[in-house]
Amino acid sequence: MKRIIFLLFAIVAIITILAGCATPAPATTPAAKPAPSPSSAPAAPITMKFSHNVPVASAMHKDINLPWAEKIKERTTAIGKPVEITFFPNSVLGKASEQYDLVVDGVVDITGNWGPQNEPGRFYLIRALELPFLFTGATAAAQTAQELFDTRPEIKQEFREAKLLYFHPTGSYEIHTNKLQVKTLNDFKGLKIRGTGGVNSDVITALGATPIAIDVGEVYPSLEKGVLDGTLINWEGAMAFKYYEVTKYRTQIPQGLTLSILAVSMNLNTWNKLPPDVQKIFEEYSGMAMSRQNGQTFDKVNNQLLQVIKQKDKAAGNPDVYVVPQDELQKWKSTVSPIYDKWVADIEAKKLPGKSILDDVRRLAEKYSK
């Protein structure tokens, strides 16, 4: 019996020893957490080049085009497709007469401050807005231009080579001279005044002066050297290009003499490549609302700079700005009135609706001037 008990204890001891020598089961490790997915990289910006021919100090750049570009960037960034617009101002990429070709040919994506007066072979109908005594400021002119574009297929056809975004006309032109102060029609005789061709030059000729076609960048030295006796320009332009430094006399014309229709356009390929939601944002900041805002901005700045020029003239000992009285102004209007018939005849000779367009321009000018 003792032998059996001893044998049982021996067996239990052997089993215990063997159990102690066995490899322990590995401890259960917690399930590994999935690696965090890398945060999605921000979308590469859509970059655009914006060329124009005016200084960065001008209202056209700092008060109209630059805030517009900033708003476009803000809105497109909010949808994850930022558009970054880099400016090339002051004709660094081309003269005023070359700006439209820059955008049509795709050298730049956007061009501003270009005007039909620089493109005589492309634009005829829209230049009706340059006819004299139609607008007292940029606001009415901008809205008239935009409504014509929106409602007249013939006008839209003229702008077909690029995507028109908005208009930003200048304020009405005044007379800045360095020989004498123009007060009457007789004072125009013998003066060489910078003209832009077409209607603008026709107005200068009708008043009795000689129009001289010079690029905007060459006007300052031409006034300084006496190649020009004067120029037609708004108050803002006289400040931006510093023409006030090389002219002494100023003549203000109530009801506006003439002005330039300027615009901002985008290259068609650039436009077509944009995502639809980005195009939508551009559309929101184009058209009538933008054109109207631009006109209001320009008129406000233009009036402010008239006061600045008056102060500078006073400090320089120049005469006060001369305002043409109504009786004399009527003589000027009568003198230039044949220009309207000439314009219609010239346009209709090209098989274009000159009279119909002029009727619309006059109607809209009156509508928006109110």
Image (spheres, rainbow, N blue to C red):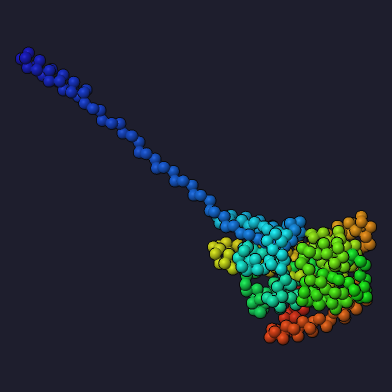
Residue 357 sits in quarter: bottom right
Does 202 appear above or below 168? below
Q: Position of residue 276 (x, y in %)?
A: 54, 64
Residues 79 and 198: in front is 198
- Report the residue at 57% width, 57% height from top: 46
Does 309 appear above or below 365? above
Classify residue 76 as left or right of residue 28. Answer: right
Q: Position of residue 111 (x, y in %)?
A: 67, 64
Is residue 190 among what the camera can see? yes
Residue 195 sits in quarter: bottom right
Q: Where is residue 72 in the image (x, y as percent from the top left)?
A: 63, 58
- Report the residue at 72% width, 71% height from top: 118
- The tally of labels here is 0
- Report the residue at 79% width, 74% height from top: 200
Is residue 72 among what the camera can see? no
Q: Residue furthest top?
A: 2
Classify residue 29 as left or right of residue 68. Answer: left
Classify residue 361 as left or right of residue 333. Answer: left
Q: Position of residue 162 (x, y in %)?
A: 62, 70
If the image is split into quadrants, where does the C terminus sit?
Answer: bottom right
Does 201 appear above or below 38? below
If the image is split into quadrants, where does the N terminus sit?
Answer: top left
- Report the residue at 76% width, 56% height from top: 57
Classify residue 187 as left or right of residue 107. Answer: right
Residue 166 sits in quarter: bottom right
